[in-house]
Image (spheres, rainbow, N blue to C red):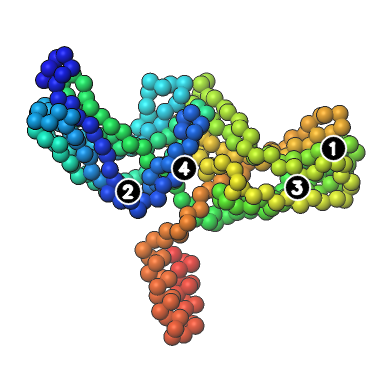
Amino acid sequence: MSFFGFGQTAEIDIVLNDAETRKKAEHKTEDGKKDKYFLFYDGETVSGKVNVTLKIPGKRLEHYGIKIEFVGQIELYYDRGNHHEFVSLVKDLARPGELSQSQTFDFEFTHVEKPYESYTGQNVKLRYFLRATISRRLNDISKEMDIVVQTLCSYPELNSSIKMEVGIEDCLHIEFEYNKSKYHLRDVIVGKIYFLLVRIKIKHMEIDIIKRETTGTGPSVYHENDTIAKYEIMDGAPVRGESIPIRLFLAGYELTPTMRDINKKFSVRYYLNLVLIDEEERRYFKQQEITLWRKGDIVRRSMSQQATIAAQRFEGSNSESASASAQAKEENN
């Protein structure tokens, strides 16, 4: 190998086995732009090929090993020197030696745990990526390929409605009610606002969706609030006894699932913020946290649930009572 930079070098390319059929998802980059990445879910296998192409034909490439890693990593922007890895898997592709020609190496990470959703925020980034590395004496050759992970949830077992009151003694008394406290990302927030006492000249009312990103712990905690949506409820003065319906569609906004205490590094929470403005431009607020979750396009059931459903379909053709029994069994499970 030449010490003047004229020695053999190589290019690395990472190709997934199911690249032609795997779905892609848009994801925001650090500079605010959107790119498309291959989409994975928790527990899915990640497999493919690493193509090593020698740049100078006929010249050997000495190396100290070739490997590929699957990494899940959190990076706090105020602490860029430290990358917090919560997933780190390594596969050795080649032992130390020489490459005399371009070569392809297969790899497979089976049923990889991906516990958190990919996220790019104002102060933090959670990313998953593959990194192939050719180890060399002076400078390694490496290539990274990012993927996007989404976490899917099922319908919450408990999803109670939200009822709250806003009041200023002898001046204002408002009750507002939302149909539930947990919403999937393409859900609709349905509610009503009741004016029980109005002695303040209100000229405007709106509901805001606020995203609050919290990073760090202890004295070095950072909070970033971002108003995702503004929904005008009323323009003009309400009267006592009036009720105003609310219907807010979430699908049109850039939302992520609620993320609580992710690897003890950051959280992302969402709030409905009711804002009232009177004729003297005074603002009155009432805030309520809601939980957002990602609903899968395909419901992923366990093997036992699938078996129970299959049994129901089979027995349903024989007798209704057998079908009811199988349904009871599924509910108990």
Q: Which residue is tagged 3?
A: 176
Amino acid type indicated by mark 4: Glu
Amino acid type indicated by mark 1: Lys
Q: Which residue is tagged 4?
A: 26
Label 2 and label 1: CA atoms lie apart by 55 Å
Q: Nearer the viewer, residue 273 or 323?
A: 273
Amino acid type indicated by mark 3: Phe
Residue 198, position in %: x, y? Answer: 88, 41
Instruction: Look at 30% across and 37% down and name the residue there.
Output: 130
Q: Which residue is tagged 1?
A: 203
Label 4 and label 1: CA atoms lie apart by 40 Å
Q: Which secondary structure lies at badge 1?
A: strand
Instruction: Look at 53% across and 42% down and name the residue there.
Output: 256
Q: Which mark is residue 19?
A: 2
Residue 100, position in %: x, y? Answer: 9, 33
Which-is-in-front pick, marks 3 and 2?
Answer: 2
Q: Residues within 10 Å of mark 4 (few under 14, many from 20)?
A: few
Residue 79, position in %: x, y? Answer: 43, 21
Instruction: Look at 48% across and 28% down and name the residue there.
Output: 31
Residue 165, position in %: x, y? Answer: 76, 43
Quarter of the figure with the N terminus: top left
Question: Image height check: is 104 above or below 9?
Answer: below
